[in-house]
Image (cartoon, rainbow, N blue to C red):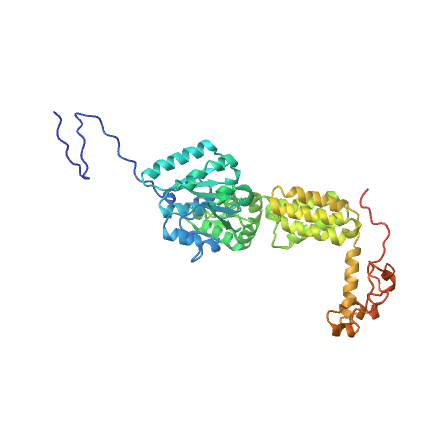
């Protein structure tokens, strides 16, 4: 006969091992917090330096500042709502999602839309349903959510709607175009801005000084000027800056005192010469833009394409390029080919709509068209001639026959008298003067011969 059950030190009955089935094992211990999972020692610096708390988080003050939404959600510790985090690479989307999940005490399940499909989604949702029965909430983080097609996004709808999972999606693309309307209606979209140069520099300094997760043990020496240039070249992407800093630091040979010196050439090699050389806050930004416009004005389509590529590959804002092309279309082509403005404005709108990298195609098309178009600066010359006269005759009154008689008093004063409409009186075009008396006969829009046809 088996012995009676006794109680263990923890107050639970000890099983009678002599008879009866062996009981099911105890439930697994509670899941450790997201931030407690230390990245591997050989993980990239950007992963090792990921903020563990909101106090370590840099940037996005409009979301995490005092009294702002994300800070309130994290500090309250309640379940977060479903959110779509929209922002460029390296702006902190994944970190915010992890901080939200940890503070709420929820399970954090991360999927990449690049590597996962409907099968992985269904498995994650099934596990979330089981966890829900145990009283656990689940935060499902989907990175690059815009890469899921419609059916994959639809697979998440029921679980998001009934609260099985809280969806935190991250995307670099406009959710209005890339995320299903049904999913958008169940989530709030938050926009993350590119990090400022000061933000990126602060992150780099923290990584250089951190003795545990950062580059502190390497004793890296880098000038403030080079550090600032790296922060600018990263274009608001902390991951790019940290990756370049780590690569250049590890490639540097230790000196006699064990320290490693990182100079500008090492940073150029680590970041990429085109990206590092392009400084959109400095002179080179305007030098490259000037080269593009002058090449197109000179009808050299090949040179214009080269300078366009330098701008784009260096990280220039496509809207900046589009604005310059729109100016070129009117200033240097104008009425010689009115379609030039149509091409430039269409390229600007399409570039704004689709963003890089695909925006390079409409920008390239517009650049080639403008370079090959006939050239004329008649519009520019006409305006500046008129502007010079306008400044010199600013007190010259408007002729009475060109004034609008909106009251009987104005009509009695002669306003509008002698005005002739070319619609009813074709001779009015040559017979009725429209310039002030001192400028009669002045010509701004000079007739031109055939426009420069551009290259053969």
Using the image as rendered, state which of residue 241 and residue 270 is in the foreground.
241
Q: Is residue 362 left or right of residue 335?
A: left
Query: Could you say which is closer to the camera, residue 164 or residue 329?
Result: 164
Q: Is residue 349 left or right of residue 105?
A: right
Residue depicted at 73% across the width and 51% down the height:
329
Residue 55 shows up from this direction: no
Direction front: furthest residue: 408
Viewport quadrant of the C terminus: top right
Tell me where residue 340 appears, x and y as whole percent.
Answer: 74, 48
Identify the image quadrant of the N terminus.
top left
The x, y position of residue 76, in whole percent, is 37, 52
**Residue at (49%, 42%) from the top-left corner?**
182
Residue 455 horizontal/vertical position (percent): 80, 44
Coordinates of residue 269 in the picture (x, y in percent): 57, 43
Question: Vertical placement of 334 versus 20: above or below?
Answer: below
Q: How many marks?
A: 0
- Whether residue 62 can be seen here: yes
- Residue 108 is left or right of residue 364, and the answer is left
In the image, residue 285 above or below residue 157:
below
- Which residue is at the front of the view, 184 or 56? 184
């Amino acid at each position: 006969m088996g012995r009676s059950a006794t109680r263990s030190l923890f107050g639970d009955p000890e099983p009678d091992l002599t008879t009866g089935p062996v009981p099911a094992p105890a439930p697994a211990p509670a899941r450790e917090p997201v931030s407690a999972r230390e990245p591997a020692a050989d993980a990239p610096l950007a992963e090792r330096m990921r903020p563990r708390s909101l106090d370590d988080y840099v940037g996005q003050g409009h979301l995490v500042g005092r009294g702002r939404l994300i800070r309130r959600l994290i500090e309250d510790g309640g379940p977060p709502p479903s959110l779509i985090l929209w922002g460029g690479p390296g702006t902190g989307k994944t970190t915010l999602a992890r901080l939200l999940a940890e503070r709420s005490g929820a399970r954090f399940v991360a999927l990449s839309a690049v590597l996962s499909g409907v099968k992985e989604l269904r498995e994650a949702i099934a596990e979330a349903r089981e966890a829900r029965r145990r009283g656990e909430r689940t935060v499902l983080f989907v990175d690059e959510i815009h890469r899921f097609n419609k059916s994959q996004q639809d697979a998440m709808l029921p679980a998001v709607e009934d609260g099985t999972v809280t969806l935190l999606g991250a995307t670099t693309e406009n959710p209005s175009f890339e995320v299903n309307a049904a999913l958008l209606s169940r989530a709030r979209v938050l926009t993350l801005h590119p990090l400022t140069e000061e933000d990126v520099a602060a992150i780099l300094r923290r990584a250089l000084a951190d003795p545990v997760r950062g580059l502190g043990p390497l004793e890296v020496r880098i000038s403030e000027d080079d550090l600032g240039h790296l922060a600018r070249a990263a274009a608001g992407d902390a991951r790019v800056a940290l990756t370049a800093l780590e690569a250049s630091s590890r490639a540097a040979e230790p000196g006699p005192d064990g320290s490693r010196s990182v100079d500008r050439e090492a940073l150029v090699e680590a970041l990429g010469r085109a990206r590092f050389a392009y400084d959109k806050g400095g002179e080179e930004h305007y030098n490259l833009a000037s080269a593009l416009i002058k090449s197109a004005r000179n009808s050299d389509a090949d040179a214009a394409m080269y300078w366009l590529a330098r701008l784009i590959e260096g990280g220039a804002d496509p809207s900046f390029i589009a604005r310059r092309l729109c100016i070129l279309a009117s200033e240097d082509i104008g009425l010689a080919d009115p379609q030039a403005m149509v091409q430039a404005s269409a390229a600007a709108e399409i570039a704004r709509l689709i963003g890089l990298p695909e925006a390079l195609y409409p920008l390239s098309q517009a650049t080639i068209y403008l370079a090959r178009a006939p050239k004329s600066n008649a519009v520019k010359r006409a305006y500046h001639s008129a502007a010079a006269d306008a400044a010199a005759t600013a007190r010259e009154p408007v002729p009475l026959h060109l004034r609008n008689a909106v009251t009987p008093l104005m009509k009695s004063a002669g306003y509008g008298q002698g005005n002739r409409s070319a619609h009813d009186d074709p001779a009015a075009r040559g017979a009725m003067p429209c310039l002030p008396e001192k400028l009669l006969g002045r010509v701004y829009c000079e007739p031109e011969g055939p426009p420069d046809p551009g290259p053969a």
